[in-house]
Image (spheres, rainbow, N blue to C red):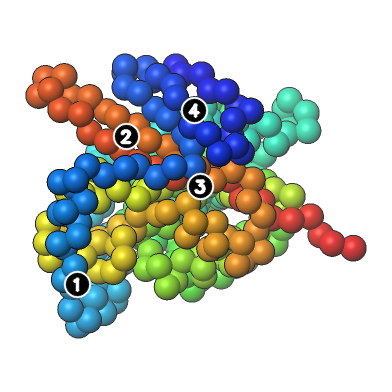
Amino acid sequence: MFQENSSANCLNIITTTSTEDGAFQKKGHSARVLSPEEAERLAKDQVLVSEFKQLKLEKEAQKNWDLFYKRNSTNFFKDRHWTTREFEELKACREFADQKLTILEAGCGVGNCLFPLLEEDLNIFAYACDFSPRAVEYVKKNALYSTERCKVFQCDLTKDDLLENIPADSVDVVMLIFVLSAIHPDKMHLVLKNIYKVLRPGKCVLFRDYGLYDHAMLRFKSGSKLGENFYVRQDGTRSYFFTEEFLSQLFKAEGYEQVVNEYVQRETVNRKEDLRVPRVFLQSKFQKPFNKT
């Protein structure tokens, strides 16, 4: 378990902590600094995937994620037990200890975040949706799934209206965790506009996703680049790597207020192979303003 000086959250400083596995982690507003070799490699990789292939990837985005879950079943992602530790908002937003909390996990995958939360907090009711019909079916087949505790449905957040499944202004917390990066940058604002409608005034979106110069970004081979900070994997799924500035502008343009928005830099260590891997994420909290009178 690591401890953090929470008073540093909104200041332009870096907070360094240690983690349970011995790796270090730091939070702040400074992007990761590339080594000269890394900078040279990225500078050379300027050739973009053809427009024809990019249009095909966009058209087949749902199919590619469905095939991803067909290949990997429920085994690819680890359960995210760190969520409540990282986002104290899940506890702090209650007015009293046992208050019922309504959350939306937008892009729930196969439930790696959803089910640990439901186990950990018996006073949560969760809405959860995913782009992939196959992922939604895996959630419904999970032994922990109960319609008394959650409602799960298939949804393309860029075009399917969440109001068809969730009442307006009814959700206390929206979790957007490693989801927005999979969506084309031109359509990200549609997701934020959609979830804004179901979020209660004064409540927050909790965001975590890939940050600029994360190790995954540096591993892409030539011929994988779709645009600035946007890449395609071999299986056809895509990934965007966020800057603090881009994310802030994206949310503010849709009417949200920024509470916290910072890089999390983490160095994971493979002692067996003596490898140090730099991971970079963006962890943020954006609030829907109270109704103005």
In the rendered structure, find residue 78 and report the number of the disc placed on it: 2
Say left or right for 70 vs 79: left
The image quarter containing residue 252 is bottom right
Q: Secondary structure at mark 2?
A: loop
Q: Which residue is mark 3?
A: 207
Where is residue 21 drawn, in percent x and y? 31, 18
Q: Which residue is mark 4?
A: 15
Mark 4 or mark 1, earlier in chain: 4
In 3D space, how far apart are the residues under numbered discs 2 and 3 (Cα atoms)?
18 Å
Where is residue 276 drawn, in percent x and y? 20, 29
For image coordinates 32% across by 42% down, the residue present is 33
Question: Disc 1 residue type?
Answer: Leu
In the rendered structure, find residue 243 and report the number of the disc placed on it: none
In 3D space, how far apart are the residues under numbered discs 4 and 1 (Cα atoms)?
37 Å
Q: Which residue is mark 1?
A: 48
Mark 1 or mark 2, earlier in chain: 1
Label 2 vs label 3, nearer the camera: 3
Say left or right for 209 vs 45: right
Mark 2 or mark 3, earlier in chain: 2
> Is there any visible trace of residue 38 in the rendered image?
yes
